[in-house]
């Protein structure tokens, strides 16, 4: 199962873009520890070196739902500005949002149309007489490729199919990135307060465990039990 998350500084200053870069490192480290597959979909660099305005990643693997849930929300960093040493502000906030993944439709052989054609370019009399080149067209999208590498029509058909599938995968990635871009209004919706995680200091250590209401529920049960006794 694929989940897509976006880590963004929103309208925050350079300090927030530094926090985004640090959080991305933490996310990647934690994903690796949990054997999750991560693909970088899009990254917008910040004005300062080593900073990131916004980054979107795809996460796949076992327990991915739990992983995403543990990160989505407001992230707080408590520390001295990396760029304005005399700045009094100590609390910086960024946001992590989940983006709905687009559905990936599988490519059916019935959706591919093959057309034999004469090869072009150098190659002597053979290319002028034999229609060995193959054009493969994906009917739903109109995307087409041509293979004329071999004198064998069968081999060219195989090559054309492979190239078409690669091109369709590239097109899916482009569409996904465009889909992510359209949802970047999340940058404007970073909320302060109630952070899902808190980090401190220049070494970016986690100082607060992810939100859990288990302890609160247990306390309420105990209080209720004491009242009834």
Image (cartoon, rainbow, N blue to C red):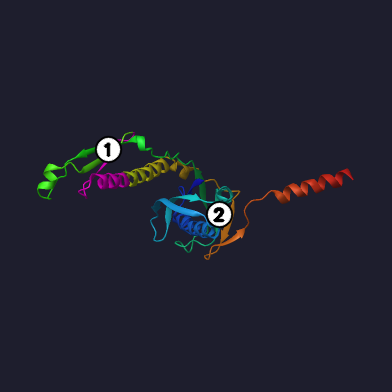
In terms of image quadrants, where is residue 45?
Answer: bottom left
Q: Nearer the viewer, residue 186 or 82?
A: 186
Tag 2 secondary structure: strand
| Magenta span includes 153 | yes
Residue 65, position in %: x, y? 57, 47
Left or right: where 95 falls relative to 109: right
Q: Residue at x 50, y 50 (%)?
A: 60
Q: Residue at x 40, y 43 (%)?
A: 176
Left or right: where 30 falls relative to 159: right
Q: Which residue is disc 2 drawn over?
A: 76
Q: Which residue is disc 1 drawn over?
A: 114
Residue 57, position in %: x, y? 46, 50
Q: Residue at x 81, y 48 (%)?
A: 222
Say above or below: 122 vs 50: above
Q: Residues within 10 Å of mark 2 (few under 14, many from 20)?
A: many
Q: CA distance from mark 2 to mark 1?
A: 55 Å
- In the rendered image, the residue lying farthest to the bottom is 203
Question: Where does the magenta region start and end?
Answer: 140-163
Left or right: where 47 falls relative to 149: right
Tag 1 secondary structure: strand
In terms of image quadrants, where is residue 76?
Answer: bottom right
Q: Nearer the viewer, residue 180 or 174?
A: 174
Q: Residue at x 48, y 54 (%)?
A: 37
Q: Nearer the viewer, residue 140 or 92?
A: 140
Q: Quadrant of the C terminus?
A: top right
Q: Residues within 10 Å of mark 1 (few under 14, many from 20)?
A: some
Asked if labels 1 and 2 touch by Cβ distance under 8 angstroms, the answer is no
């Amino acid at each position: 199962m694929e989940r897509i998350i976006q880590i963004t500084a929103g309208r925050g200053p350079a300090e927030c873009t530094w926090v985004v870069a640090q959080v991305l490192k933490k996310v990647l480290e934690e994903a690796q520890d949990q054997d999750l597959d991560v693909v970088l979909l899009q990254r917008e660099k910040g004005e300062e070196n080593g900073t990131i305005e916004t980054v979107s990643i795809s996460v796949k693997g076992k327990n991915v739902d739990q992983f995403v849930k543990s990160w989505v929300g407001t992230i707080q960093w408590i520390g001295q500005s990396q760029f304005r040493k005399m700045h009094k502000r100590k609390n910086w906030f960024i946001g992590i949002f989940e983006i709905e993944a687009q559905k990936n439709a599988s490519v059916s052989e019935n959706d591919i149309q093959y057309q034999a054609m004469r090869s072009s370019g150098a190659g002597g009399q053979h290319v002028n007489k034999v229609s060995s080149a193959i054009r493969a067209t994906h009917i739903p999208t109109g995307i087409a490729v041509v293979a004329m590498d071999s004198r064998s029509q069968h081999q060219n058909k195989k090559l054309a199919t492979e190239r078409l599938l690669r091109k369709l995968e590239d097109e899916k990635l482009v569409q996904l990135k465009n889909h992510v871009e359209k949802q970047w209004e999340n940058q404007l919706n970073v909320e302060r307060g109630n952070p899902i995680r808190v980090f401190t200091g220049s070494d970016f250590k986690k100082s607060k465990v992810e939100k859990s209401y288990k302890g609160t529920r247990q306390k309420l049960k105990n209080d209720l039990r004491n009242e009834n006794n």
